[in-house]
Amino acid sequence: MKLTASKLNTFTMFKLPSAFLCGVRTKSINDKQCIVTVKHKWINQNPFKSMFWAVQGMAAEFSTGALMIAKIQESGHKISMLVTTNNATFTKKATGKITFTCNDGDKIDQAIAQTIKTGEGQTIWMQSTGINQDGVVVSTFNFEWSIKAKQK
């Protein structure tokens, strides 16, 4: 079953309700990238009239994680995945609609091939950049994912 934006949004509603309530939505996913949006509103704001950093983190992580899930499904292997480290940089107040994009599909392909081949865990750093409606970067998140092929 190929993952689509619609299927990911349904998944979010049932499995990640806090992200869904805060407005995290997948806009598109393909072999190379995943795009997730979130709009600043009352439920996800901080006291400074901008989007709470953790809501930005949910959207950013989902753009990397959804891409990882899609690639694991495509591989046909059972592979575990876990975020082991993350960091973020905030460069402007997040107001309005923020679009997070991860373009690391190729990195995932290499890591999955290696864990399947060796049976050893692999780590991969993935980045998601948040851009506002004016095209200005508001935040950049980096996530270190650990993956490992499960024994059959």
Image (tube, rainbow, N blue to C red):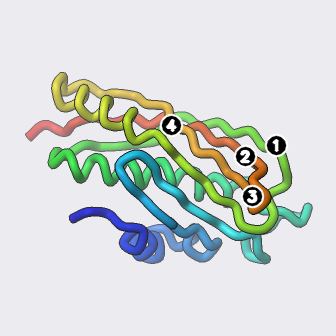
Depth check: give the residue in front, 14 or 74: 74
Q: Earlier in the sequence, mark 3 or mark 1?
A: 1
| Residue denoted by label 4 | 126
How far separated are the C-alphas under marks 4 and 2?
14 Å
Q: Are marks 3 and 4 in contact (CB under 8 Å)?
A: no
Q: Residue at x 67, y 51 (%)?
A: 130
Q: Secondary structure at mark 3?
A: loop
The three-letter code of the residue at mark 3 reads Asn
User: In the image, residue 48 lies at what x, y percent?
Assistant: 91, 61
- Front of the two marks 3 and 2: 3
Q: Which mark, by number, is residue 139?
A: 2
Q: Residue at x 29, y 43 (%)?
A: 80
Judge left or right: residue 29 versus residue 37. left
The three-letter code of the residue at mark 4 reads Met
Q: Which mark, by number, is residue 91?
A: 1
Q: Are marks 4 and 2 in contact (CB under 8 Å)?
A: no
| Residue denoted by label 3 | 132
